[in-house]
Image: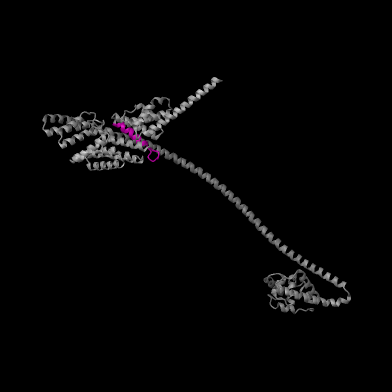
Amino acid sequence: MRQGAYLIIIILMIVLCRCNRHQLFSSSLDRADSLLRTNPDSAFYVLQNMGKDIEEASKPLRMRYLLLWAQSRNKTFLPLPSRDTLQTLLDYYDDDDNNRMTALYMMGCLYRDSNNVYKTLQYLSDAAVIADTTDSNCDFYTLSRIYSQMSALFHRQKAPRFELEYSKLAERMAWKAKDTLGAVTEVRFRSWAYQMLNDTDSVYLICKRAERVYSYMGLDKEAARTMPSLIDIYLSRDSLLQAKAAIDRYEKFSGFFNGKNEIRRGLENYYGLKGRYYFQIGIIDSAMFFYRKMLCYPDKINNLKDGYNGLVDIFRNQGNKDSLAKYSNLASIVADSIKRLYSPENLALSHTNYYADRSNEMAINSRADKLIYAWGIFIAFLLFLAIGYIIFRFYRNKLNAHQKVINTEKRQIKLLEERCAKAKTEYKTMANKYNQDLKIKTDEISELERMIYVIQKRMEIQSEDNTTLLANTDSLNLQLKALLTKLNKDSHKARAATKEDLLKLRYLTSECAPEFFNHISSPQYDLSDREILICTFIRYDFKPAEISIMLGVSPQITSNLRARINMRLFGISGTRHLDDNIKKLKSYGV
């Protein structure tokens, strides 16, 4: 058990150590990547120290290390890794646009260092084609370097028009990458193309503009590095004081010179400018020294050309025919070599044939693309028809289902409307029947109440002495008068008569004016209880407004009832002469 626990602990420690080492390796790569642009020497040092741990890293980290290693060696002017190594990077980053673009760029730089112009152009162009400039994540910085390398390549091939074209592309990508220094430097390099075109005004303007921008940015070293082109112009214009100031500034601030005042390897063409300066101011020994110094760097044929031509000028000025003939012959040989090197045939090999091959390749690809495009359109058309048919069927089925729902709802609405009409008809029939039954029952109740009241009064009268019978009849008249007086007062106070008072009025009228009462209550006239009461009030001189107050109805209802009474009793429409005709009816009593 203990051995098993120890084994597990050891395995966990190994895993943790490997994870920690993996994290440290990744962090070191991030640090090297951040230093690559601004301080490539430090990035190279960091990557060099990581080389011993590369085999233990995962494959993605190893590939990233190799890509950064190649970039750092390129930036520090060291030989690049082998072609197999770079091809491994290309195969690995097949689906990663930015890293594949960088790997193609490194492959182009490898062929650049081996002076294979055709392959260099091929890989640099392929790298530029991969870049998706519409994507915000595009590596515009690397793309600007690619175009800058193509511009420099055409400069070496003496093709200034191509050089200008790619230089402008490099500047534009540098601005997109927010690389101000790179953009301004690319503008400065453009002056070399204008030198080939003998456009000294453009060269001067570009160099002065670049110098001002560098100085504004506080980059004195870069500002001083613009001087060689200006020195050449100053010497051409015989502005020797300005040429001397530019020479001093270049040697003091450019950072290209060591303690022995020797320029950095690869920039020896500056000695030709300095030799020209001393020749023009008449210090022939110094001029000869710098021209001969250029001959010490024959790896660049332009150094030999400038050196020999400078010595020819000196010996011609001195009248030294032997030396003049010697160096004229050497200068002629170099000129022939340069002519062959940069002949139209060689230039065609370097870029014209390249673009011709690319055109043929693009034509073949174009035909294939057109065929694929045609098939794509045909398949897309079939898919469009299929999708259109599916959508048509879907919406037609949906529309039919919706129409069925609408038809069902319409049938339901029609049935409900029929039921509603039937219910309304039944309601009207039942309402009319109810009103009729209500009227009958109301009249019946009124008649029964009247009969009950009469019977009760008769019973009261019968219970009294026969001696008081006559006195009681007079008493009814008195009661009627008292009741009318009370009702009159109530009408003036806008107070309706009570049910008891109305029944009492009806009874006293039937007793005190039996002929009048029997006439208006005759079945032939079919007057309601309310209409009989209205006739009674008219008989006793009550106005229509007072009658409305007594019965508790509106004046309009009273007017309508009066018109109905006039029509039934006297056959006269409206209420004309109603009061007079009622008062003319036979009556006695009050």
Q: Is residue 31 above or below residue 550?
A: above
Q: Main secondary structure of the magenta part?
A: helix
Please state, as top left, top right, bottom left or bottom right, where the N terminus lies in the image. top right
Q: Residue furthest right?
A: 466
How far across and down, in percent of the image, does residue 18 sit?
46, 26
Q: Which residues are magenta?
A: 117-138
**Viewer-side residue, 24 vs 351:** 24
Q: Is residue 212 magenta?
A: no
Determine if the magenta segment contains residue 118: yes
The answer to whether 47 appears left or right of 491 in the picture is left
Please name the residue shown 33% across and 37% down the image: 144
Q: What residue is at 41 percent from the left and 28 percent from the top?
A: 62
The quadrant holding residue 230 is top left
Choose between 1 and 561: the one closer to the eye.
1
Position of 393 with respect to 42 (left or right) is right
The answer to whether 585 is drawn above or below residue 203 in the figure is below
Q: Quadrant of residue 428?
A: bottom right
Residue 257: image location, x then y, percent: 25, 32
Residue 125 visible: yes
Residue 569 occupies quadrant: bottom right
Image quadrant containing the C terminus: bottom right
Q: Can residue 514 be seen at all in this image of the molecule?
A: no
Residue 435 horizontal/vertical position (percent):
72, 64
Expressed as whole percent of the image width and height from the top left, the position of residue 317 reads 12, 34
